[in-house]
Image (tube, helix red, strand yellow):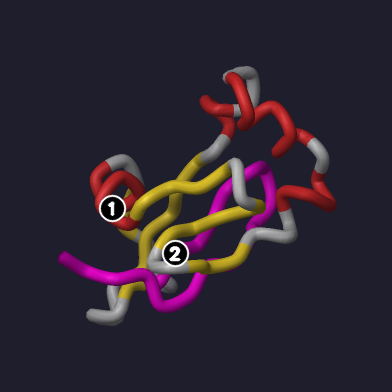
Amino acid sequence: MNRIKEVKPLEDYKLLVIFDNGEKRIKDMKPYLDKGVFKKLKDKNFFNSVKIAYGTVTWNENIDLCADSIYESSDSYSEE
C-alpha cells in the first residue's frame, strides 16, 4: 500500500495527491460536496485547509479520506 506524502488543493475542488512512490494523482471532490460532512468543503477556505494526518487526507477530525480510497478513485496526473 502506498502512503500519502503530500496533498495540495487545486482549483475546482480537486486535490493533487503525491504518494511515497512518487506517483501523483488527482482526486475530484465535486461529487462529494452535497453529501453529509463533505458539504463543509464547499467553503473554499475550509477546502484549502486540507492536510495529511495519520496517513489520511483530512480537513478536521470529522472529514478524512484514506490513501487506498483516494488511490482507487482518482486519476493519474502528468505534468506534461
- Name the residue: 51% across, 47% down: 64
- Name the residue: 50% across, 62% down: 16
| Mark pair 1, 2: CA separation | 9 Å
Q: Residues within 10 Å of mark 2 (few under 14, many from 20)?
A: many
Q: Position of residue 54 (x, y in %)?
A: 43, 68
Q: Amino acid at mark 2?
A: Val
- Name the residue: 41% across, 78% down: 5
Q: Amino acid at mark 1?
A: Tyr
Considering the whole magenta stretch, tell me its main secondary structure: strand
- Residue 73 is left or right of residue 39, and the answer is left
> Which quadrant of the figure has residue 40?
top right
Which residue is under mark 2? 17
Q: Position of residue 49 (x, y in %)?
A: 73, 60
Which residue is under mark 1? 71
- Name the residue: 31% across, 41% down: 73
> Which quadrant of the figure has residue 67?
bottom left
Secondary element under disc 1, as helix, strand or loop, is helix
Residue furthest front in the image: 61
Query: Of marks 1 and 2, which one's residue comes earlier in the chain?
Result: 2
- Residue 39 is left or right of residue 26, and the answer is right
Span highlighted in magenta in the image: 1-18
Q: Is residue 16 magenta?
A: yes
- Residue 11 is left or right of residue 51, and the answer is right
